[in-house]
Amino acid sequence: MTDLDSLKKLARENGYLYTKDVTGAGIRREKLKRYTDEGSLIRESRGIYSFADSINDEFVLLQSRCKKGIFSYGTALYFHGLSDRFPQMVSMTVPKNYNVFYLKEELLHVEFHRIKPSLWSIGIMEMASPQGGKIMVYDRERCICDIIRGRKKTDPQVFSQAVKGYFTSKDCDNIRLMKYAKEFHIEGKVQEYMEILL
C-alpha cells in the first residue's frame, strides 16, 4: 500500500481529506504538500484536500467550508424541483452570529443570508446534491416561507413557479407550512396564497 492509498483511507464519507484527520493518524503534513506538488492531491481550501482522480461535489465542499451554511432560497428551490432555473449565485443561510467574513472574500459565487439563530434551524433536512453527495438544505415549507418573506427581492418568475408548484404538489404539507409561518410571523400572507392556490 502506498502513502497515497493510506491517505485515501482517511478520506471522509464526502470524499474529502482533512488535514486534522491526516495529522491525527500520525502522518506528517509534508506528505500532503508532496502529493499536492506532484498533482495527486488538490488543495480545495485551508485544511481540505481532494484526490485528483475523484469526482468532487462542489456543494459538499461548500458546506465543509461553511459548516453552518444551509442551502436556501433559489438554490434549495432548484434542489426541490420547485424552480427549473439554477441561480447564478448559490444561496446559503447562516445564523447572524456566525462569522462568514473571510468566506465572503473567497466565495464570490455564494450569497450569504443571515438570520436569528433561533430561526436558522427551522426546516433543516438532509438530501443528495445534484452530484450525489449528502448536503443540508431547507425543506420545501421553509423555502416557501423564505420567498414569501423576501418576495420583493425574489425574481417574479421564480416566485410564481415555486409557490404554484408547491401548492399544487401532492407533497404540500399545509400544517408544517403554517407552523413555520407562525414562527416567522407571516401567517396572514401564507394564508392568502393558500386561499388563492388551493
Image (cartoon, grey):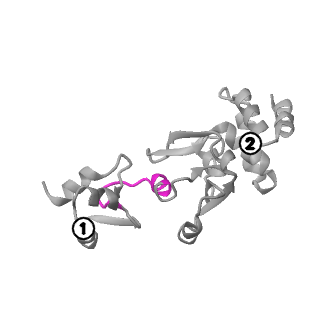
Where residue 128 appears, as percent x and y from the top left, is 48, 41
Q: Which label number is shown at residue 191?
A: none
Where residue 180 appears, as percent x and y from the top left, is 73, 37
The answer to whether residue 136 is left or right of residue 184 is: left
Distance from disc 1 to disc 2, alpha carbons, whole Å, reads 46 Å
- Residue type (three-letter) at the residue carrying disc 1: Tyr
Q: Is residue 52 magenta?
A: yes
- Residue type (three-letter) at the residue carrying disc 2: Cys
* Residue position marked by numbered label 2 in the rendering: 145
In the displayed structure, 74 sits above or below 35; it is above
**Viewer-nearest residue: 195 or 168:** 195
Asked if the residue at tag 2 contacts the one at tag 1, i.e. Cβ–Cβ closer than 8 Å, the answer is: no
What residue lies at 65% left-to-right and 28% top-to-bottom?
Answer: 171
Which mark is first along the chain, 2 or 1? 1
- How many residues crowd around disc 1 within 10 Å: few (fewer than 14), some, or many (20 or more)? some
SS type, badge 1: helix
Where residue 4 appears, as percent x and y from the top left, is 20, 59
* Residue position marked by numbered label 1 in the rendering: 35
Which quadrant: the C terminus?
Answer: top right
Residue 175 appears in which quarter of the rendering? top right
What residue lies at 38% left-to-right and 64% top-to-bottom?
Answer: 47
Please state the extent of the stretch shown in magenta in the rendering.
49-63
Where residue 61 appears, as percent x and y from the top left, is 45, 56
